[in-house]
Amino acid sequence: MESTIKPKKKSRLTLYIIIGLFVGIATGFILNKNYVDGENARLEALDTRLKEIKAAQHSTTDSLALVSLEADKKAVNEERNAVLEARDKKTEPFSILADVFLRLIKMIVAPLVFTTLVVGVAKLGDISAVGRIGGKTLLWFVGASLLSLLLGMIMVNIFEPGIAMHLPVPDTGESSGIANVAFSLKNFLYHIFPASVIESMAKNEILQIVVFSLFFGVATAAIGEQGKIIINFMDAAAHVILKITGYVMNLAPVAVFGAMAAIIAKQGMGILKTYSIFIGEFYFSLALLWGCLGLAAFIVIGKRVVNLVKRIKEPILLAFSTASSEAAFPKTMEELQRFGAKDKIVSFVLPLGYSFNLDGSMMYMTFASLFIAQSYGIHLPIATQISMLLVLMLTSKGIAGVPRASLVVIAGTLATFNIPEAGLALLLGIDPLLDMGRSATNVLGNSIATAVVSKWENALEPEVAGE
């Protein structure tokens, strides 16, 4: 849309985000060793005590001893929660920096999606054009989702991290603390169609906002001259919101610093050592997925895919650092328009992608689900794994906007296939580190989808000169 951001300023912001990332890591390491070291040491001792209690429970049949051990276990868990709360309070000043930034981004996303999508749909002119572009978009989304899920399944079967790591697994009866949401057609449809667009905007339910915007945009185009007033107003409002985005983005380096400092202060480097196999293999699999998506994009848009990745490196870095693909949404939209994708395509495809095309999250779902099965020594035949893949394909479409959505979907899938849900506890500690890679991949996947659909619609223009 606008071309007010000069290349020098843009590259400076990227540089500041990178600086914030590394300074945050260094600060977090110092905090981990000197500021929250007491809490971390206490947590380690309590975790060791819990393992001892569980071992004792398994080795005795004395009912009185079991009652005593269960009471000890409850007391240790209560103390552990108190220590976690104390540690969170110490790192709160750093996490607040990231939280304030994310709240400002969420403040922008709903009105940005609404205004840009209404303008985009109204410019398309009729419902047949909306249906045609929607069909092409969903075709790509389904293909990319299946690729992500299948690649995750293949890689976890090749690496077998659950077998190689020999992790002590939680008792099958324990709760992971993650809500178990089973797929139902009713909940899926209720999640798509809003009862109130005001409520949808308040909760940042992107898919529901998209549905309302589609109706509003088509109706706006249908009323002719009067609709042009609405279109001009919405177009101006979208430009205002993008200007606000520029202001908010100035806080990105500070947010990245705070997010990384808080994560590293809590997790330290010890967890990286314990889970190095899983983290390394998952990120290697994500790199393969990037290559596959890039190759698919190259087939459609040619060498311009290289320029596309260069364009979106800042949103990708932002999503990685804050572990939130939503944080990168406004900037991604702006960069795709500068790349040459028409605003009517960008405003249609990108919001849909945030509900239907989360490629990084998709890969994680099969990778993590089968990792937990491996950790418990549960062998799943290939046919069962393919069934799991298809279940994940469906369930993942109905939970956009749910906190820790990937873990919620995995919890429901584990229950479906009789895999202990307690195994999710194996991943809770490293989930923030894995979420960083998932979020960055989601941004890449949706950017590629937008560029591809633009090309299919003959709506991919030359890049904006001087940007």
Image: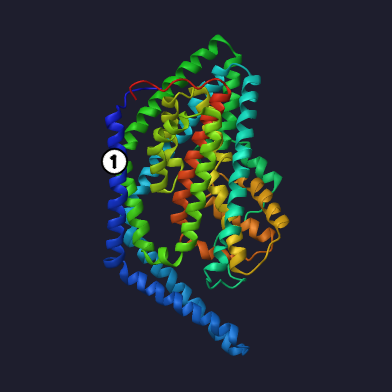
Measured as percent of width and height from the top left, residue 282 is found at: 50, 55
Task: Decide: is 428 above or below 258.
Answer: below
Q: Position of residue 351 (x, y in %)?
A: 53, 34
Task: Determine whether the residue tagged by mark 1 lies in a helix, strand or loop.
Answer: helix
Q: Is residue 92 left or right of residue 225?
A: left
Expressed as whole percent of the image width and height from the top left, the position of residue 186 reads: 70, 44
Label 1, residues with CA under 10 Å away: few <14, some 14-19, many ≥20? some
Where residue 121 sits in the image (x, y, percent)?
56, 22
- Work out which quarter of the rendered image holds the N terminus and state it: top left
Identify the residue at horizontal 51%, vertical 81% (top origin): 53
When asked about the image quadrant of residue 329, the answer is top left
Residue at the image point whose x is 65% and y is 25% from the top:
131
Q: Is residue 206 visible?
A: no
Closer to the camera in the image, 376 or 56 = 376
- The quarter of the displayed image where residue 158 is located: bottom right
Name the image quarter holding residue 242.
top left
Say above or below: 426 vs 390: below
Q: Is residue 83 left or right of residue 362?
A: left
Q: Quadrant of the C terminus?
A: top left
Tell me if residue 86 comes above or below residue 100 in the rendering. below
| Residue receiving disc 1 | 15
Query: Which residue sits at x=56%, y=71%?
Result: 170
Above or below residue 186? Residue 212 is above
Dot 1 amino acid type: Leu
Q: Does the rendering let one see residue 50? A: yes
Q: Is residue 163 left or right of residue 116?
A: right
